Amino acid sequence: MNNSVDRQKKIVEILKMLHEGDDFETAKQIFDATFDGVDVSEITSAERELIASGLNPMEIQNLCNVHAAVFRGKINPNQETPTADIPGHPVQVLKLENMVLMSLINDELLPTLKKWQQDGDNPDYLARLQQALRDLATIDKHYARKENLIFPLMDKYGITAPPKVMWGVDDEIRGWIKDAHQLVMQQPLPDKYAIEAAIEKAAKEVDEMVFKEEEIMLPMVLEVFTPSDWGMVAEESAPIGYTLIAQPLPWHPTEAQLAEKPKVSQRAKELNAMAQVLAESQDFCSARKSEPSVNQTIAAIHADAPQLPNQTAGKTPDDLPPITIASKPRLRDKQNGLVSGAADQTRIEIDGINPAKVLLPTGSFDLDELMNVLRILPLDLTFVDANDTVKWFSNSEHRIFPRTTAVIGRLVVNCHPPKSVDRVIAILEDFHSGKRDHADFWFNMRGKTIYIRYFAVRDTQNNYLGCLEVSQDITEIQQLEGEKRL
């Protein structure tokens, strides 16, 4: 079958058979009899068509391994991209981690499991199982880099469906590894067959995700990511960390590579076109307002500032005098002494000599002071604007959750795994409508108590400006007793 339209229809037909509960072997036989090989873009486009037609991404997630099993061995091989051989390049790092992970599973975890089953009285085998599962749990860093660096870039290029599906599976794998580790740590130990099933399930799912990353995700993103994109991934990977490998060699794109424009290929066009269909079907995308430009924003801030005479014609920036943007006269409320019209008093002052100063109703900062005050706060702060787009996050040295600049400009609903999206949407809808002004959550994570609060940000006229997320490790606060006075 060579006609691309007919091929696409047949792939969708086979996937629908699987989703409607038809026999896997029957679907596999139909596929094998119809296709000699299939391109990555054909698989992902078919999955996007299913989502765009109304199928819940979580349902595709549940059958994602089945899809991979149908196509395994039939995906057309491409020449290995040179990036896979460049030391320190994110593609090389991801593949190296996958190689070590598979060695951990096939050369240590599963063989030790078999030996332990045959000789359950040997404590060394149990200790090795426990350690292997602890090592396997560090896959969290591998997935966190993918979710916080690669997925946002895929969003940027309109490839939105694969991240939603893959992120959900990542979370499930984390859970299966955790479950297996908890079983081997129990005293007394549970049934050996329960431990065997849990470990083999975790190992199988990790193996399937390695296949999806290397045979589906990487070929897809290599079609559209620029060297500049990969440079950002490399630069921001270290704060998140790596899985079972040493710090990679530094890699940076060359000046010539940085000048490269985004690639335009038939596959990229197909991916973007299908993703656009999906995006237009999502309320949060279609309802977004257009973002004002930087110049429009500055003009709005200083719309009523004194106008300078136009004396700049024919002059270079070095010839021009420093600019001062002055604030209005400060008016005092007679009753309580506070500045009235507080929102109107906020200004940025630039005199060309001193650092730019942010004037607020209750005082001022220069930009360096403001940046470092925000940096030193013992909180993780993230601001999502009125269009539900991530606008800013604090760069604390001890963040609770990883944040990278790749999320700036990304719809916040795409920054969460599928299982959390419904709750995120519900909170934002309540904030937009004014139904509530905050939402609080707390939970235990790696031995720490985490407190997360979401606040609706509104102006003095009660117009919705966005949402502020405040995350805090309150473990030590909960342990405070008595008093300690200054």
Image: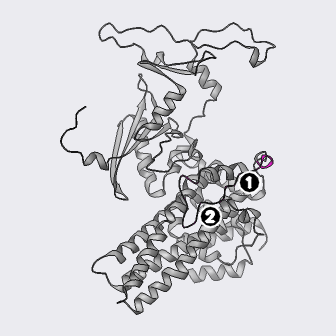
Residue holding disc 2: 94
Please tell me whether residue 255 belongs to the stretch shown in magenta.
yes
- Please state which amino acid type lies under the numbered disc 1: Lys
Q: Earlier in the sequence, mark 2 or mark 1?
A: 2
User: Image check: 267 left or right of 381?
Assistant: right
Q: Is residue 334 magenta?
A: no
In this rendering, the answer to whether 274 lies above or below 82 is above
Query: How far across and how far down the image is residue 194, in percent?
Result: 37, 82
Residue at mark 1: 269
Most frequent secondary structure within the magenta stretch: loop
Which residue: 31% across, 76% down?
A: 186
Instruction: Identify the secondary structure beneath mark 1.
Output: helix
At label 2, counting other C-alpha atoms closer than 10 Å, the crowd grade (few under 14, some 14-19, many 20 or more) is: many
Amino acid type of the residue tagged 2 in the rendering: Leu
Question: Do the residues bearing badges 2 and 1 touch, measured as CB atoms within 8 Å?
Answer: no
Q: Residue at x 40, y 89 (%)?
A: 117
Quadrant of the rendered image containing residue 207: bottom right
Residue situated in front as seen by the camera: 119 or 432? 119
Q: Position of residue 253 (x, y in %)?
A: 74, 51
Q: Nearer the viewer, mark 2 or mark 1?
A: 2
